[in-house]
Image (cartoon, rainbow, N blue to C red):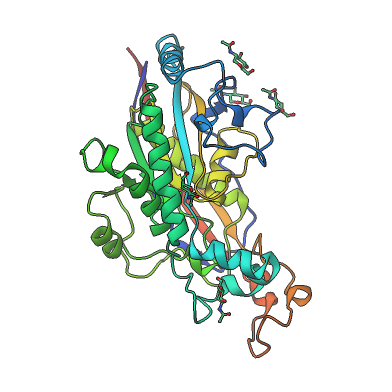
Amino acid sequence: MVSFTTSLLTSIPLVASVASAFSAPAAHYGNYSIVNGFFKQSDNSTDPKTFDYKENLGLQDNLTWSEFKDQIDDLNANADLRVDYKVFFFARHAEGYHNVAQDYYGDDAWNCYYSLIYGNGTSEWGPDAYLTEKGEAAAVNNSKLIKSLIADEFPLPQAFYSSPFTRAADTLVLTWKDLVLDTGYASPIFKESLRETIGLHTCDQRRSKAYLSARYPQFQFEHGFITAETDLLWTKDEQETDEGKFYRARSFLDDVFASDDSTIVSVTAHSGIIAGLLSAVGHRKFSLATGAIIPVVVKRESRVDFVPVQQDFSVTIGPSSTAPTCATAISSTIPSDIAYSTTSVNEAKSVLTVTTVVSATATSN
Ligand SMILES: *[C@@H]1O[C@H](CO)[C@@H](O)[C@H](O)[C@H]1NC(C)=O
Ligand SMILES: *[C@@H]1O[C@H](CO)[C@@H](O)[C@H](O)[C@H]1NC(C)=O
Ligand SMILES: *[C@@H]1O[C@H](CO)[C@@H](O)[C@H](O)[C@H]1NC(C)=O
Ligand SMILES: *[C@@H]1O[C@H](CO)[C@@H](O)[C@H](O)[C@H]1NC(C)=O
Ligand SMILES: *[C@@H]1O[C@H](CO)[C@@H](O)[C@H](O)[C@H]1NC(C)=O
């Protein structure tokens, strides 16, 4: 195995008025790809719309969990020095109040108006929308599902990472509480890089570290987790692009592969960032329903010849990738006295500068 001494320092200051196009770092210290043959979700012939994760989490019919675990161990044991395999359980949070509101108002009115306000008087979805009762019940059902698989030697994840949003952390708690949290088996870690698409939608505005720390005493925070009372990364006028999410997802993967020896890793997050993670590992597009969990097998080939450099790259946030042209979307459901203007969204130019300092020393032993 190649052992890495890695210090990965990611700072994400918001720098206003530096308009520049998206530019990717030229070099990278590893490649990610998907290993097919284990899960139906990774198979092109599986239709995501009819796929039901509750059927054994998509494990191929010709495998038991025990055989699966053995095959992953074999892959790692026989791998080239530069190669590692991990299994990620990507879990989308269960139903939140923002999901209900989006269904109720429809995508256009939601993206154009309702997602930008905090609630409608009877229902609140921002900041940081909570799970609905139905969402909580779905997460409890997932817990029963996992327990039913344990009898078949289901490999319990060894590490748990969570988005710093209550709908994700609550889903994690309700799914894994008695198996993992109450037993002291593992302590989940909050990662800023697992939050949902940054900006515009109030449901994606984060609560403070103090709030999360009081609500989730069994969780840890990643080193450097932003402690400010307000969410410094979220702005009401701009939204992170898909490219921004791709690089954020890859920074999460780089971090986990460099710092965590676990082979089986649970990630509880959101549809947008999970799409970014799937894209970053080369998985086909696969949308998850609320509460869905999909395991994927990821191979990483590290570059022994990679010369660490200070990488500075900019990710332009905005114009919104989801806000529609409101002129056509505005309907009678949207109060006419609201002076919401799309131009303010589309012309907003500020840049999220991500400075990644990577230093990796590869030594064969
Ligand atoms: C199990 O089935 C999958 C999907 O049909 C296939 O890709 C894989 O090769 C099979 N594995 C074995 C060991 O037969
Ligand atoms: C799935 O489809 C993609 C694109 O069409 C192709 O590149 C890939 O090899 C396919 N994967 C499998 C396992 O057939
Ligand atoms: C607020 O939205 C919820 C759906 O999220 C809906 O059930 C409720 O009727 C709405 N309330 C008002 C006052 O429109
Ligand atoms: C939870 O499982 C029960 C029993 O299978 C089912 O009746 C219920 O609809 C499920 N609830 C959710 C929210 O999925
Ligand atoms: C990563 O992928 C690129 C493009 O497929 C390839 O040129 C490069 O050699 C790969 N690097 C490693 C370390 O596998």
* 154, above or below 121, in the image: above
* 288, above or below 341, in the image: above
* 284, above or below 95, in the image: above
Residue 46 placement (x, y as % from top left): 67, 31
Q: Is residue 222 visible?
A: yes
For this orientation, the residue located farthest to the top is: 78
Viewer-closest of 52 and 301? 52
- Answer with left or right where residue 339 lies relative to residue 353: right
Q: Residue at x 68, y 80 (%)?
A: 333
* 251, above or below 147, in the image: below
Q: Quadrant of the C terminus?
A: top left
Q: Residue at x 33, y 32 (%)?
A: 260
Residue 139 placement (x, y as % from top left): 42, 48
Residue 192 placement (x, y as % from top left): 40, 52
Q: Residue at x 59, y 44 (%)?
A: 24
Residue 156 placement (x, y as % from top left): 35, 29
